[in-house]
Image (cartoon, rainbow, N blue to C red):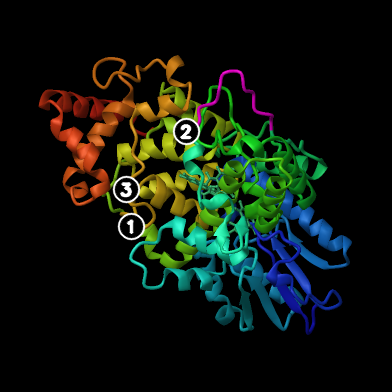
Amino acid sequence: MTKGGALRLVLGDQLSEGLSALDGLDAARDVVLMLEVREECTYVPHHPQKIVLILSAMRHFAAALRARGVTVDYVALDDPANTHSFTDEVARAVARHRPEGVIATHPGEWRVLEAMRGWEDSLGLPLDIRDDTRFLASLEFFRRWAQGKKALRMEFFYREMRRATGLLMDGDAPEGGEWNYDSENRKRLPRDLIPPPPKRFPPDDTTREVMALVGREFPRHFGSLDGFAWPVTAEQAQAALDAFIAERLPRFGDYQDAMAEGETTLFHALISTSLNLGLLDPRAACDAAEAAWRRGDAPLNAVEGFIRQILGWREYVRGLYWLRMPGYAKLNALEAHRALPEFYWTAKSGMRCMDAAIGQTRDMAYAHHIQRLMVTGNFALLAGVAPDAINEWYLAVYADAYEWVELPNTHGMAIHADGGVMASKPYAASGAYINRMSDHCGKCRFDVKASTGEGACPFNYLYWDFIARHERRFASNPRMSMPLANLRKMEGAKLKDMRAQAKAFLDQHAPLP
Ligand code: FAD
Ligand code: DLZ
Protein backbone atom coordinates (compact mmCIF):
# COMPACT_ATOMS: atom_id res chain seq x y z
CA MET A 1 0.00 0.00 0.00
CA THR A 2 -0.46 2.61 -1.45
CA LYS A 3 0.72 2.04 -5.00
CA GLY A 4 -2.01 3.80 -6.95
CA GLY A 5 -3.75 4.93 -3.79
CA ALA A 6 -3.74 8.25 -1.97
CA LEU A 7 -1.82 9.51 1.04
CA ARG A 8 -4.38 11.18 3.30
CA LEU A 9 -2.98 13.63 5.81
CA VAL A 10 -4.78 14.14 9.11
CA LEU A 11 -3.46 16.99 11.28
CA GLY A 12 -3.63 17.11 15.05
CA ASP A 13 -6.75 19.30 15.13
CA GLN A 14 -8.55 17.31 12.43
CA LEU A 15 -9.65 14.31 14.47
CA SER A 16 -13.12 13.87 13.01
CA GLU A 17 -14.55 10.73 11.46
CA GLY A 18 -16.25 12.84 8.80
CA LEU A 19 -13.09 14.81 7.89
CA SER A 20 -13.07 15.84 4.23
CA ALA A 21 -9.55 14.39 3.77
CA LEU A 22 -11.04 10.97 4.59
CA ASP A 23 -13.99 11.26 2.17
CA GLY A 24 -13.98 8.34 -0.26
CA LEU A 25 -11.15 6.59 1.57
CA ASP A 26 -10.28 3.23 -0.04
CA ALA A 27 -9.06 1.09 2.85
CA ALA A 28 -7.45 -1.37 0.42
CA ARG A 29 -5.20 1.23 -1.23
CA ASP A 30 -5.00 4.43 0.76
CA VAL A 31 -2.77 5.28 3.71
CA VAL A 32 -3.66 7.81 6.40
CA LEU A 33 -0.64 9.81 7.55
CA MET A 34 -0.45 11.30 11.05
CA LEU A 35 2.60 13.16 12.31
CA GLU A 36 3.80 14.14 15.76
CA VAL A 37 6.35 16.85 15.02
CA ARG A 38 8.47 19.03 17.25
CA GLU A 39 7.93 22.07 15.01
CA GLU A 40 4.22 22.07 15.89
CA CYS A 41 4.96 21.61 19.59
CA THR A 42 7.38 24.53 19.72
CA TYR A 43 6.42 27.24 17.19
CA VAL A 44 5.06 28.77 20.36
CA PRO A 45 5.90 27.11 23.70
CA HIS A 46 2.57 25.32 24.11
CA HIS A 47 1.32 24.44 27.58
CA PRO A 48 2.30 20.80 28.32
CA GLN A 49 -1.38 19.86 28.84
CA LYS A 50 -2.18 21.16 25.35
CA ILE A 51 0.58 19.05 23.77
CA VAL A 52 -0.51 15.99 25.73
CA LEU A 53 -4.13 16.57 24.76
CA ILE A 54 -3.33 16.80 21.06
CA LEU A 55 -0.88 13.90 20.89
CA SER A 56 -3.03 11.62 23.03
CA ALA A 57 -6.17 12.46 21.02
CA MET A 58 -4.18 11.80 17.81
CA ARG A 59 -3.06 8.40 19.10
CA HIS A 60 -6.62 7.47 20.09
CA PHE A 61 -7.92 8.61 16.71
CA ALA A 62 -5.28 6.55 14.87
CA ALA A 63 -6.21 3.50 16.96
CA ALA A 64 -9.90 3.96 16.10
CA LEU A 65 -9.10 4.20 12.37
CA ARG A 66 -6.95 1.06 12.55
CA ALA A 67 -9.76 -0.78 14.34
CA ARG A 68 -11.89 -0.01 11.25
CA GLY A 69 -9.29 -1.59 8.97
CA VAL A 70 -7.65 1.63 7.81
CA THR A 71 -3.87 1.67 7.31
CA VAL A 72 -2.38 4.46 9.39
CA ASP A 73 1.25 5.52 9.05
CA TYR A 74 1.83 7.22 12.40
CA VAL A 75 5.13 8.98 13.03
CA ALA A 76 5.68 9.36 16.77
CA LEU A 77 7.54 12.23 18.39
CA ASP A 78 10.31 9.93 19.62
CA ASP A 79 10.79 8.13 16.29
CA PRO A 80 14.55 8.54 15.65
CA ALA A 81 13.93 9.12 11.91
CA ASN A 82 11.40 11.92 12.56
CA THR A 83 12.50 15.19 10.89
CA HIS A 84 9.95 17.10 12.99
CA SER A 85 8.33 19.22 10.28
CA PHE A 86 5.10 18.60 8.36
CA THR A 87 6.78 19.36 5.02
CA ASP A 88 9.71 16.99 5.49
CA GLU A 89 7.60 14.24 7.02
CA VAL A 90 5.10 14.32 4.15
CA ALA A 91 8.06 14.05 1.74
CA ARG A 92 9.42 11.04 3.64
CA ALA A 93 5.99 9.41 3.64
CA VAL A 94 5.64 9.96 -0.13
CA ALA A 95 8.98 8.21 -0.60
CA ARG A 96 7.78 5.31 1.59
CA HIS A 97 4.37 4.81 0.00
CA ARG A 98 4.64 6.22 -3.55
CA PRO A 99 1.03 7.41 -3.65
CA GLU A 100 -0.75 8.83 -6.69
CA GLY A 101 -1.45 12.01 -4.78
CA VAL A 102 -1.82 13.61 -1.40
CA ILE A 103 -5.19 14.60 0.08
CA ALA A 104 -5.49 17.05 2.97
CA THR A 105 -8.11 19.18 4.70
CA HIS A 106 -7.65 22.96 4.80
CA PRO A 107 -5.57 23.60 7.95
CA GLY A 108 -6.56 25.94 10.76
CA GLU A 109 -3.56 28.23 10.55
CA TRP A 110 -2.26 30.47 7.80
CA ARG A 111 1.39 29.45 8.28
CA VAL A 112 0.49 25.76 7.69
CA LEU A 113 -1.53 26.59 4.57
CA GLU A 114 1.44 28.59 3.25
CA ALA A 115 3.72 25.60 3.77
CA MET A 116 1.22 23.25 2.09
CA ARG A 117 0.98 25.49 -0.94
CA GLY A 118 4.58 24.57 -1.79
CA TRP A 119 4.06 20.83 -1.54
CA GLU A 120 2.74 20.12 -5.03
CA ASP A 121 5.99 21.47 -6.51
CA SER A 122 8.33 20.00 -3.95
CA LEU A 123 6.69 16.55 -4.01
CA GLY A 124 5.97 16.45 -7.74
CA LEU A 125 2.51 15.05 -6.97
CA PRO A 126 -1.05 16.39 -7.07
CA LEU A 127 -2.18 17.83 -3.73
CA ASP A 128 -5.89 18.11 -3.05
CA ILE A 129 -6.59 20.57 -0.19
CA ARG A 130 -10.26 20.11 0.61
CA ASP A 131 -12.53 22.54 2.46
CA ASP A 132 -12.85 21.99 6.17
CA THR A 133 -16.54 21.11 6.36
CA ARG A 134 -16.64 20.82 10.15
CA PHE A 135 -17.90 24.38 10.55
CA LEU A 136 -21.45 25.66 10.23
CA ALA A 137 -20.46 28.44 7.82
CA SER A 138 -18.21 27.80 4.86
CA LEU A 139 -15.50 30.38 4.17
CA GLU A 140 -17.40 31.22 1.00
CA PHE A 141 -20.60 31.90 2.97
CA PHE A 142 -18.66 34.29 5.25
CA ARG A 143 -17.01 36.04 2.31
CA ARG A 144 -20.37 36.61 0.67
CA TRP A 145 -21.83 37.95 3.92
CA ALA A 146 -18.85 40.29 4.42
CA GLN A 147 -18.79 41.57 0.87
CA GLY A 148 -19.48 45.30 0.58
CA LYS A 149 -20.08 45.73 4.33
CA LYS A 150 -18.44 48.67 6.09
CA ALA A 151 -18.57 47.01 9.50
CA LEU A 152 -18.43 43.28 10.12
CA ARG A 153 -20.40 43.03 13.35
CA MET A 154 -20.85 39.56 14.84
CA GLU A 155 -24.46 40.22 15.82
CA PHE A 156 -25.61 40.54 12.19
CA PHE A 157 -23.60 37.55 11.04
CA TYR A 158 -25.15 35.56 13.89
CA ARG A 159 -28.67 36.43 12.74
CA GLU A 160 -27.80 35.22 9.25
CA MET A 161 -26.55 31.99 10.79
CA ARG A 162 -29.74 31.55 12.82
CA ARG A 163 -31.74 31.96 9.61
CA ALA A 164 -29.44 29.67 7.62
CA THR A 165 -29.49 26.85 10.19
CA GLY A 166 -32.99 27.29 11.62
CA LEU A 167 -31.52 27.09 15.14
CA LEU A 168 -33.82 28.69 17.74
CA MET A 169 -36.11 29.95 14.99
CA ASP A 170 -39.89 30.11 14.91
CA GLY A 171 -40.45 30.41 11.19
CA ASP A 172 -38.67 33.61 10.17
CA ALA A 173 -38.58 35.02 13.70
CA PRO A 174 -36.22 34.28 16.58
CA GLU A 175 -37.68 32.09 19.33
CA GLY A 176 -38.93 34.26 22.19
CA GLY A 177 -39.05 37.35 19.98
CA GLU A 178 -35.45 38.53 20.55
CA TRP A 179 -32.26 37.54 18.77
CA ASN A 180 -30.05 38.09 21.80
CA TYR A 181 -30.64 37.79 25.55
CA ASP A 182 -27.23 39.06 26.61
CA SER A 183 -28.67 41.78 28.85
CA GLU A 184 -30.00 38.99 31.13
CA ASN A 185 -26.59 37.30 31.27
CA ARG A 186 -24.58 39.56 33.55
CA LYS A 187 -25.26 38.34 37.07
CA ARG A 188 -22.75 38.05 39.88
CA LEU A 189 -22.40 34.59 41.40
CA PRO A 190 -24.35 34.45 44.69
CA ARG A 191 -22.27 33.33 47.68
CA ASP A 192 -24.39 30.21 48.31
CA LEU A 193 -24.47 28.93 44.72
CA ILE A 194 -21.86 26.25 44.06
CA PRO A 195 -21.45 25.40 40.37
CA PRO A 196 -21.35 21.64 39.66
CA PRO A 197 -17.81 20.74 38.58
CA PRO A 198 -17.24 19.71 34.96
CA LYS A 199 -16.74 16.05 34.11
CA ARG A 200 -13.09 15.01 34.31
CA PHE A 201 -11.34 12.33 32.28
CA PRO A 202 -8.34 10.96 34.18
CA PRO A 203 -5.45 9.83 31.96
CA ASP A 204 -5.59 6.30 30.52
CA ASP A 205 -2.47 4.30 29.52
CA THR A 206 -2.07 6.15 26.21
CA THR A 207 -2.34 9.56 27.84
CA ARG A 208 0.05 8.56 30.63
CA GLU A 209 2.61 7.47 28.04
CA VAL A 210 2.28 10.81 26.24
CA MET A 211 2.52 12.69 29.55
CA ALA A 212 5.87 11.05 30.26
CA LEU A 213 7.08 11.87 26.75
CA VAL A 214 5.98 15.52 26.93
CA GLY A 215 7.44 15.90 30.42
CA ARG A 216 10.79 14.69 29.06
CA GLU A 217 10.76 16.63 25.80
CA PHE A 218 9.38 20.01 26.87
CA PRO A 219 10.40 20.44 30.52
CA ARG A 220 10.67 24.23 30.30
CA HIS A 221 7.25 25.01 28.80
CA PHE A 222 5.00 27.05 31.11
CA GLY A 223 2.26 25.02 32.77
CA SER A 224 1.60 22.04 34.96
CA LEU A 225 0.89 18.52 33.71
CA ASP A 226 -0.64 17.35 36.99
CA GLY A 227 -4.37 17.13 36.99
CA PHE A 228 -4.71 16.51 33.25
CA ALA A 229 -8.39 15.63 32.73
CA TRP A 230 -9.33 16.70 29.17
CA PRO A 231 -11.47 14.50 26.91
CA VAL A 232 -9.21 12.76 24.37
CA THR A 233 -11.79 10.77 22.37
CA ALA A 234 -15.09 11.57 20.66
CA GLU A 235 -16.90 9.43 23.25
CA GLN A 236 -15.41 11.39 26.13
CA ALA A 237 -16.16 14.69 24.39
CA GLN A 238 -19.79 13.63 24.05
CA ALA A 239 -19.91 12.68 27.74
CA ALA A 240 -18.51 16.13 28.63
CA LEU A 241 -21.19 17.83 26.52
CA ASP A 242 -23.96 15.65 28.00
CA ALA A 243 -22.87 16.49 31.55
CA PHE A 244 -22.77 20.20 30.71
CA ILE A 245 -26.25 20.18 29.15
CA ALA A 246 -27.72 18.32 32.13
CA GLU A 247 -25.91 20.10 34.97
CA ARG A 248 -24.62 23.53 33.96
CA LEU A 249 -26.44 24.81 30.87
CA PRO A 250 -29.50 26.02 32.82
CA ARG A 251 -27.36 28.62 34.62
CA PHE A 252 -24.81 29.19 31.84
CA GLY A 253 -26.55 32.41 30.75
CA ASP A 254 -27.07 34.01 34.15
CA TYR A 255 -23.42 33.62 35.22
CA GLN A 256 -21.68 33.73 31.85
CA ASP A 257 -19.79 36.92 32.76
CA ALA A 258 -19.23 36.15 36.44
CA MET A 259 -15.91 35.46 38.13
CA ALA A 260 -15.45 34.09 41.63
CA GLU A 261 -12.69 33.22 44.08
CA GLY A 262 -11.76 29.54 43.83
CA GLU A 263 -14.21 28.92 40.95
CA THR A 264 -12.23 28.08 37.84
CA THR A 265 -15.04 26.93 35.55
CA LEU A 266 -18.38 28.25 36.94
CA PHE A 267 -21.18 27.20 34.55
CA HIS A 268 -19.00 27.10 31.42
CA ALA A 269 -19.02 24.08 29.11
CA LEU A 270 -15.29 23.29 28.76
CA ILE A 271 -15.89 21.95 25.28
CA SER A 272 -13.69 24.27 23.22
CA THR A 273 -10.79 21.78 23.27
CA SER A 274 -13.07 19.06 21.88
CA LEU A 275 -14.73 21.30 19.28
CA ASN A 276 -11.39 22.61 18.06
CA LEU A 277 -9.81 19.15 17.81
CA GLY A 278 -12.82 17.85 15.91
CA LEU A 279 -13.91 15.43 18.62
CA LEU A 280 -17.23 17.23 18.94
CA ASP A 281 -19.44 18.59 16.20
CA PRO A 282 -20.55 22.22 16.71
CA ARG A 283 -23.97 21.57 15.22
CA ALA A 284 -24.52 18.65 17.60
CA ALA A 285 -23.61 20.88 20.56
CA CYS A 286 -26.10 23.55 19.42
CA ASP A 287 -28.81 20.94 18.75
CA ALA A 288 -28.34 19.42 22.21
CA ALA A 289 -28.76 22.85 23.83
CA GLU A 290 -31.84 23.69 21.76
CA ALA A 291 -33.38 20.31 22.61
CA ALA A 292 -32.85 21.02 26.34
CA TRP A 293 -34.79 24.29 25.93
CA ARG A 294 -37.59 22.62 23.96
CA ARG A 295 -37.89 19.98 26.72
CA GLY A 296 -38.15 22.77 29.29
CA ASP A 297 -34.85 21.77 30.93
CA ALA A 298 -33.01 25.07 30.35
CA PRO A 299 -34.19 28.69 29.96
CA LEU A 300 -33.95 30.61 26.71
CA ASN A 301 -31.36 33.16 27.94
CA ALA A 302 -28.96 30.27 28.72
CA VAL A 303 -29.58 28.33 25.53
CA GLU A 304 -29.48 31.35 23.21
CA GLY A 305 -26.32 32.57 24.96
CA PHE A 306 -24.62 29.20 24.52
CA ILE A 307 -25.69 28.77 20.90
CA ARG A 308 -24.55 32.34 20.11
CA GLN A 309 -21.03 31.51 21.31
CA ILE A 310 -20.77 28.59 18.91
CA LEU A 311 -22.99 29.54 15.97
CA GLY A 312 -22.09 33.21 16.22
CA TRP A 313 -18.70 33.96 17.74
CA ARG A 314 -16.86 30.76 16.84
CA GLU A 315 -17.94 30.82 13.20
CA TYR A 316 -17.49 34.58 12.94
CA VAL A 317 -13.89 34.61 14.21
CA ARG A 318 -12.95 31.84 11.81
CA GLY A 319 -14.52 33.67 8.87
CA LEU A 320 -12.80 36.89 9.83
CA TYR A 321 -9.41 35.18 10.26
CA TRP A 322 -9.44 33.69 6.77
CA LEU A 323 -10.91 36.84 5.22
CA ARG A 324 -8.22 39.12 6.67
CA MET A 325 -5.08 37.01 6.93
CA PRO A 326 -2.16 37.42 6.57
CA GLY A 327 -2.40 41.22 6.99
CA TYR A 328 -4.65 40.94 10.07
CA ALA A 329 -1.87 39.58 12.31
CA LYS A 330 0.36 42.54 11.50
CA LEU A 331 -2.12 45.25 12.53
CA ASN A 332 -1.16 47.34 15.54
CA ALA A 333 -3.75 50.12 15.52
CA LEU A 334 -2.95 51.30 19.06
CA GLU A 335 0.80 51.24 18.44
CA ALA A 336 1.40 49.00 21.44
CA HIS A 337 5.01 47.95 21.95
CA ARG A 338 5.46 46.90 25.58
CA ALA A 339 6.96 43.51 26.41
CA LEU A 340 4.74 41.07 28.31
CA PRO A 341 4.99 41.69 32.08
CA GLU A 342 6.75 38.88 33.89
CA PHE A 343 3.71 37.97 35.99
CA TYR A 344 1.96 36.44 32.95
CA TRP A 345 4.40 33.57 33.58
CA THR A 346 4.47 33.61 37.38
CA ALA A 347 0.94 34.56 38.52
CA LYS A 348 2.58 36.94 40.98
CA SER A 349 1.24 40.40 40.15
CA GLY A 350 -0.33 40.76 43.57
CA MET A 351 -3.65 41.51 41.83
CA ARG A 352 -6.12 38.87 42.94
CA CYS A 353 -8.05 38.68 39.63
CA MET A 354 -4.92 38.51 37.47
CA ASP A 355 -3.20 35.93 39.64
CA ALA A 356 -6.36 33.78 39.76
CA ALA A 357 -6.70 33.84 35.94
CA ILE A 358 -3.00 33.22 35.30
CA GLY A 359 -2.69 30.64 38.09
CA GLN A 360 -5.52 28.51 36.76
CA THR A 361 -4.11 28.91 33.26
CA ARG A 362 -0.82 27.43 34.53
CA ASP A 363 -2.63 24.61 36.36
CA MET A 364 -5.37 23.73 33.84
CA ALA A 365 -4.49 25.35 30.48
CA TYR A 366 -7.95 26.91 30.83
CA ALA A 367 -9.51 30.19 31.85
CA HIS A 368 -13.06 31.14 30.97
CA HIS A 369 -13.99 33.85 28.51
CA ILE A 370 -14.42 36.77 30.86
CA GLN A 371 -11.07 36.09 32.53
CA ARG A 372 -9.39 36.03 29.10
CA LEU A 373 -11.18 39.15 27.88
CA MET A 374 -11.67 41.38 30.90
CA VAL A 375 -8.75 40.38 33.12
CA THR A 376 -5.62 39.27 31.24
CA GLY A 377 -6.80 40.76 27.94
CA ASN A 378 -7.91 44.04 29.51
CA PHE A 379 -4.60 44.34 31.35
CA ALA A 380 -2.64 43.83 28.11
CA LEU A 381 -4.83 46.41 26.35
CA LEU A 382 -4.42 49.04 29.06
CA ALA A 383 -0.70 48.38 29.49
CA GLY A 384 -0.08 48.57 25.73
CA VAL A 385 1.48 45.11 25.42
CA ALA A 386 2.73 44.46 21.88
CA PRO A 387 0.24 42.36 19.86
CA ASP A 388 2.84 39.71 18.96
CA ALA A 389 3.75 39.19 22.61
CA ILE A 390 0.21 38.82 23.92
CA ASN A 391 -0.94 36.77 20.94
CA GLU A 392 1.91 34.36 21.47
CA TRP A 393 0.96 34.04 25.13
CA TYR A 394 -2.70 33.20 24.40
CA LEU A 395 -1.73 30.81 21.63
CA ALA A 396 0.71 29.00 23.91
CA VAL A 397 -1.10 28.76 27.22
CA TYR A 398 -4.65 27.59 26.41
CA ALA A 399 -5.45 23.99 25.54
CA ASP A 400 -8.02 25.17 22.97
CA ALA A 401 -5.77 27.67 21.17
CA TYR A 402 -5.23 27.61 17.39
CA GLU A 403 -4.51 30.77 15.52
CA TRP A 404 -7.83 30.90 13.60
CA VAL A 405 -9.70 31.34 16.89
CA GLU A 406 -7.05 32.84 19.17
CA LEU A 407 -5.95 35.69 16.92
CA PRO A 408 -9.28 37.46 16.27
CA ASN A 409 -10.26 37.06 19.92
CA THR A 410 -7.00 38.55 21.17
CA HIS A 411 -6.00 40.93 18.43
CA GLY A 412 -9.51 42.10 17.61
CA MET A 413 -11.64 41.68 20.70
CA ALA A 414 -9.20 41.99 23.62
CA ILE A 415 -6.50 44.44 22.54
CA HIS A 416 -8.19 46.33 19.68
CA ALA A 417 -5.08 45.93 17.52
CA ASP A 418 -7.33 45.69 14.45
CA GLY A 419 -8.55 49.25 15.08
CA GLY A 420 -12.22 48.28 15.14
CA VAL A 421 -12.70 45.53 12.55
CA MET A 422 -14.28 43.34 15.24
CA ALA A 423 -15.42 45.70 17.97
CA SER A 424 -16.61 49.27 17.61
CA LYS A 425 -14.68 50.30 20.73
CA PRO A 426 -11.95 48.82 22.92
CA TYR A 427 -13.13 46.53 25.74
CA ALA A 428 -11.27 48.71 28.26
CA ALA A 429 -12.36 48.61 31.88
CA SER A 430 -11.19 49.84 35.26
CA GLY A 431 -11.31 47.86 38.51
CA ALA A 432 -14.99 48.76 38.94
CA TYR A 433 -15.95 46.22 36.27
CA ILE A 434 -14.03 43.43 37.99
CA ASN A 435 -15.55 44.39 41.32
CA ARG A 436 -19.04 44.30 39.82
CA MET A 437 -18.60 40.87 38.25
CA SER A 438 -16.54 39.09 40.92
CA ASP A 439 -15.64 38.80 44.59
CA HIS A 440 -11.89 39.09 43.91
CA CYS A 441 -11.55 42.71 44.99
CA GLY A 442 -12.74 42.12 48.55
CA LYS A 443 -9.74 39.85 49.15
CA CYS A 444 -7.22 41.80 47.08
CA ARG A 445 -4.33 43.71 48.60
CA PHE A 446 -5.13 46.57 46.23
CA ASP A 447 -8.05 48.91 46.88
CA VAL A 448 -10.51 48.88 43.99
CA LYS A 449 -12.04 52.17 45.14
CA ALA A 450 -8.71 54.01 44.97
CA SER A 451 -7.16 55.33 41.75
CA THR A 452 -4.01 56.88 43.14
CA GLY A 453 -1.69 56.39 46.06
CA GLU A 454 -0.15 53.39 47.73
CA GLY A 455 -2.42 50.35 47.34
CA ALA A 456 -4.64 51.76 44.57
CA CYS A 457 -5.97 49.14 42.14
CA PRO A 458 -3.63 49.08 39.11
CA PHE A 459 -6.62 48.61 36.78
CA ASN A 460 -7.81 52.10 37.80
CA TYR A 461 -4.70 54.10 37.06
CA LEU A 462 -3.86 51.96 34.01
CA TYR A 463 -7.35 52.62 32.65
CA TRP A 464 -7.01 56.39 32.84
CA ASP A 465 -3.46 56.26 31.54
CA PHE A 466 -4.82 54.31 28.54
CA ILE A 467 -7.64 56.78 27.86
CA ALA A 468 -5.27 59.73 28.17
CA ARG A 469 -2.64 58.07 25.96
CA HIS A 470 -5.18 57.59 23.17
CA GLU A 471 -7.24 60.73 23.71
CA ARG A 472 -6.70 62.05 20.20
CA ARG A 473 -7.25 58.71 18.53
CA PHE A 474 -10.53 58.07 20.40
CA ALA A 475 -11.89 61.57 19.82
CA SER A 476 -13.43 60.47 16.51
CA ASN A 477 -15.19 57.44 18.10
CA PRO A 478 -18.64 58.40 19.46
CA ARG A 479 -18.65 55.28 21.64
CA MET A 480 -15.64 56.67 23.54
CA SER A 481 -17.22 60.06 24.24
CA MET A 482 -18.16 59.24 27.84
CA PRO A 483 -14.68 58.24 29.08
CA LEU A 484 -13.17 61.14 27.17
CA ALA A 485 -15.61 63.58 28.78
CA ASN A 486 -14.71 62.18 32.20
CA LEU A 487 -11.02 62.44 31.41
CA ARG A 488 -11.41 66.09 30.50
CA LYS A 489 -13.25 66.79 33.75
CA MET A 490 -10.46 65.21 35.75
CA GLU A 491 -8.12 67.34 37.82
CA GLY A 492 -4.75 67.64 36.07
CA ALA A 493 -2.72 66.72 39.15
CA LYS A 494 -4.74 63.54 39.71
CA LEU A 495 -4.27 62.43 36.12
CA LYS A 496 -0.57 63.16 36.37
CA ASP A 497 -0.32 61.01 39.52
CA MET A 498 -2.21 58.16 37.89
CA ARG A 499 -0.01 58.25 34.81
CA ALA A 500 3.14 58.26 36.93
CA GLN A 501 1.82 55.36 38.98
CA ALA A 502 0.94 53.41 35.83
CA LYS A 503 4.48 53.84 34.57
CA ALA A 504 6.00 52.83 37.91
CA PHE A 505 3.85 49.69 38.14
CA LEU A 506 4.69 48.60 34.61
CA ASP A 507 8.41 49.34 35.08
CA GLN A 508 8.40 47.30 38.27
CA HIS A 509 6.94 44.31 36.36
CA ALA A 510 9.11 44.44 33.26
CA PRO A 511 9.83 40.98 31.81
CA LEU A 512 12.57 38.80 33.19
CA PRO A 513 15.84 39.31 31.26
P1 FAD B 1 -18.09 28.40 27.01
O1 FAD B 1 -18.08 29.71 27.67
O2 FAD B 1 -18.81 27.32 27.70
O3 FAD B 1 -18.69 28.60 25.55
C1 FAD B 1 -19.11 27.50 24.74
C2 FAD B 1 -18.34 27.44 23.45
O4 FAD B 1 -18.55 28.59 22.67
C3 FAD B 1 -16.83 27.35 23.61
O5 FAD B 1 -16.43 26.04 23.86
C4 FAD B 1 -16.31 27.89 22.30
O6 FAD B 1 -16.21 26.88 21.34
C5 FAD B 1 -17.39 28.86 21.88
N1 FAD B 1 -16.97 30.23 22.14
C6 FAD B 1 -17.30 31.02 23.16
N2 FAD B 1 -16.78 32.26 23.01
C7 FAD B 1 -16.09 32.24 21.87
C8 FAD B 1 -15.32 33.19 21.17
N3 FAD B 1 -15.19 34.46 21.61
N4 FAD B 1 -14.70 32.80 20.05
C9 FAD B 1 -14.82 31.56 19.58
N5 FAD B 1 -15.55 30.61 20.18
C10 FAD B 1 -16.19 30.95 21.31
N6 FAD B 1 -11.49 30.17 22.21
C11 FAD B 1 -10.88 29.11 21.67
O7 FAD B 1 -11.54 28.11 21.37
N7 FAD B 1 -9.54 29.11 21.43
C12 FAD B 1 -8.77 30.17 21.74
O8 FAD B 1 -7.57 30.15 21.49
C13 FAD B 1 -9.38 31.31 22.33
N8 FAD B 1 -8.65 32.39 22.67
C14 FAD B 1 -9.27 33.47 23.24
C15 FAD B 1 -8.49 34.59 23.56
C16 FAD B 1 -9.09 35.71 24.12
C17 FAD B 1 -8.26 36.93 24.44
C18 FAD B 1 -10.48 35.71 24.36
C19 FAD B 1 -11.15 36.90 24.94
C20 FAD B 1 -11.25 34.60 24.06
C21 FAD B 1 -10.66 33.47 23.48
N9 FAD B 1 -11.42 32.34 23.15
C22 FAD B 1 -10.79 31.26 22.57
C23 FAD B 1 -12.88 32.32 23.29
C24 FAD B 1 -13.40 31.76 24.62
O9 FAD B 1 -12.77 32.41 25.70
C25 FAD B 1 -13.21 30.26 24.73
O10 FAD B 1 -13.76 29.64 23.59
C26 FAD B 1 -13.91 29.69 25.94
O11 FAD B 1 -13.41 30.30 27.11
C27 FAD B 1 -13.71 28.19 26.01
O12 FAD B 1 -14.24 27.66 27.19
P2 FAD B 1 -15.62 26.88 27.25
O13 FAD B 1 -15.60 25.72 26.32
O14 FAD B 1 -15.87 26.60 28.69
O15 FAD B 1 -16.61 27.97 26.68
C1 DLZ C 1 -0.77 22.25 18.18
C2 DLZ C 1 -0.21 20.96 17.67
C3 DLZ C 1 0.80 20.32 18.35
C4 DLZ C 1 1.31 20.79 19.67
N1 DLZ C 1 1.38 19.21 17.86
C5 DLZ C 1 0.95 18.69 16.69
C6 DLZ C 1 1.56 17.55 16.12
O1 DLZ C 1 2.53 17.01 16.62
N2 DLZ C 1 1.04 17.08 14.97
C7 DLZ C 1 -0.02 17.66 14.35
O2 DLZ C 1 -0.47 17.16 13.31
N3 DLZ C 1 -0.57 18.76 14.85
C8 DLZ C 1 -0.13 19.29 16.00
N4 DLZ C 1 -0.68 20.41 16.50
C9 DLZ C 1 -1.80 21.04 15.77
C10 DLZ C 1 -1.29 21.81 14.56
O3 DLZ C 1 -0.45 22.86 15.02
C11 DLZ C 1 -2.50 22.32 13.79
O4 DLZ C 1 -3.01 21.29 13.04
C12 DLZ C 1 -2.14 23.46 12.89
O5 DLZ C 1 -1.78 24.55 13.68
C13 DLZ C 1 -3.29 23.87 12.00
O6 DLZ C 1 -4.40 24.29 12.77
Are dots 3 and 1 in contact, CB under 8 Å? no
Viewer-nearest of discs 3 and 2: 3
Quadrant where ligand 2 appears: bottom right
Q: Say which residue label 3 marks.
A: 425
Residue at the left extreme of this rendering? 492
Give the number of the disc on residue 345. 2
Magenta-colored segment: predominant secondary structure: loop
Q: Residues within 10 Å of mark 2 (few under 14, many from 20)?
A: some
Q: Is residue 195 magenta?
A: yes
> Mark 1 falls on what kind of element?
loop
- Residue 335 position, x and y percent, is 26, 49
- In the image, the segment drawn in magenta is 187-197
Q: Amino acid at mark 2?
A: Trp
* Distance between mark 3 and mark 1 Cα atoms: 16 Å
Front residue (pair 461, 486): 486
Which amino acid type is marked by label 1? Answer: Leu
